[in-house]
Image (tube, rainbow, N blue to C red):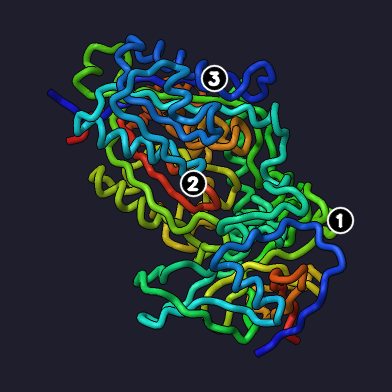
Amino acid sequence: MDRTPVIVGIGLSDYPKTPHLDGVQHHALAAQRAIADAGIAKSEIDGYVNASSNMMIDDPVTMAEYLRINHRYIDGTMTGGSSFEFHVQHLAAAIKEGLCDTALVTYGSDYLSRMGRSLGTGGFQRPGQRVAGPIQYEVPYGNSLVGAYAMYAMRHMHEYGTTSEQLAEIAVGVREYATLNPNAIYRDPITIDDVINSRMVADPLHKLDCCAITDGGGAFIMTTAERAKDLPNKPIYVLGAAGAQTHWNISQQSDFTTSAGAQSGPEAFARAGLTPADVDMIMFYDSFTITCLILLESLGFVGRGEGGPFIAEGHLRKGGSLPMNTDGGGLSSCHPGMRGMFLILEAVRQLRGDAGEAQVPNCKVALAGGSGGWLSCIGVAILGNEAPG
Amino acid sequence: MKNKVRSATEFLKPLPDPDAISSEYWRAATEGRLLIQECPTCGHRQWYPRALCTECSSDTQWLECSGLGTVNTFTIIRQYGMQPFKQELPYIVAMIELVEGPLVMGNITDCDVETVRIGDPVLVWFLKIEEGIGIPYWSPDA
């Protein structure tokens, strides 16, 4: 029996703004669509994974009850937005080992409808609040989520001469793909000047260096290559997956020019028996433009400090050598808080050849690079549409 | 070395909820002392303080710092929704590299935010909030 782990079903809930849906409904809608897409019976699902942390509402055991999943394997690993790349790693091992045969991973969030655009600069505490845990060493200083990433950009510019124009190219390229996605929240083309002339939020990051906030949800189904033989979709193989963490809170990062991807990237490639040159398209967690640059370098696509000039050559754009975020990304399409789910779903869509106008020609290997926290936890999943050799 | 301590009249920002280890850190700050930890076994120095050395897992000891450092990286916060930060915009959030080694987070105050650069020397000062809680801040070390 071939227990090679494969993805056989994907589902998106509705986005970008869906005030009629709450987070749980996003989980459920995405699950319905992923199950239908996979062509399996719901009763086959014997593994369940999610990364939500609203206890008693949509945490893993509450959602397993809500969805009535009779699971033999459950995982609630929560590494922030990269959780779903870590889930692929964990499920690949669990499926190979026989801990479960067919697993469902879900995500859902009504962030935009419930919280507005508060994630980046709204603050996570209240005035005068007494805060315990390691974050107590940060809360008096009023850093924003954008500010945390801005400190990477500032240091990277200082060490390597990276420019705002080079970062802006990322936002421009991703927006170009968003024009092809009817659901994307921002669909008007933008220029590098538009980005660098947009309001400064936290130097050196401008408004258009920052991702959108939306509602949304997603789900995927992983099973064995054996089971996939009887299913309608071309199986998408998990060729290699790995995760690593340098810190959680931003004040514990010791090097603001790189990420834990410098560890998890090479491990994922080694497991896949591939190198960055073998990758046809990338799905990077574009919380901010700088996030993509740091991932590009730390995962080994370019050397340290080489990201800016590489990006400026247009490689990440449609028609470039390494197209990135072909669904319009978090920067322009869909970012409900933990975007790692959508990296997997779009990579699968590309590998199936279902991406329409955004299709990367002859796409055989796609890499999902998830960043969780403040470039804290980097999960990497390398997927392919041909069985590993 | 004892560094400058100012007293707050009213402090509306979020505050630490001191625990068994951090209470010493916040108390020292009310007395003008910046503490990190040093491992007597392997020599590793760390901030924030913890119940073990993150390098070798030994017990740690407090080390009183000089209060001198340089700007490792920073940002100018120009948009923030929460008061009272909002009324202080724009302000600097920085990672300070202590001369003793570790990076610590803080605001750089008493300066034109537009003039701050990576590598600038800075000096700690403290704002005493209440008994047992002082907050370290940084200003340019001219």
Mark 2–mark 1 distance (CA, rounded to whole Å): 32 Å
What SS does tag 1 mark? helix
Q: Which residue is mark 1?
A: B87
State left or right for residue B83 relative to residue A248.
right
The residue nearer to you, when weighing A326 against B15, is B15
Q: Position of residue A38 (x, y in %)?
A: 36, 15
Instruction: Say few, some or many: other residues with alpha carbon within 10 Å of mark 1 (under 14 / 14 to 19 / 20 or more).
Output: few
Q: Earlier in the sequence, mark 2 or mark 3?
A: 3
Q: Position of residue B127 (x, y in %)?
A: 77, 73
Q: Is residue A72 visible?
A: yes
Tag 2 near tag 1, CB within 8 Å: no
Q: Is residue A321 visible?
A: no
Q: Which mark is residue A13?
A: 3
Residue B17 occupies quadrant: bottom right
* Mark in front: 3 vs 1: 1
Residue B21 occupies quadrant: bottom right
User: Mark 1: which amino acid?
Assistant: Gln
Most extreme residue toward the left is: A1
What SS does tag 2 mark? strand
Quadrant holding the N terminus of chain A: top left
User: Mark 3: which amino acid?
Assistant: Ser
Q: Chain of mark 2?
A: A
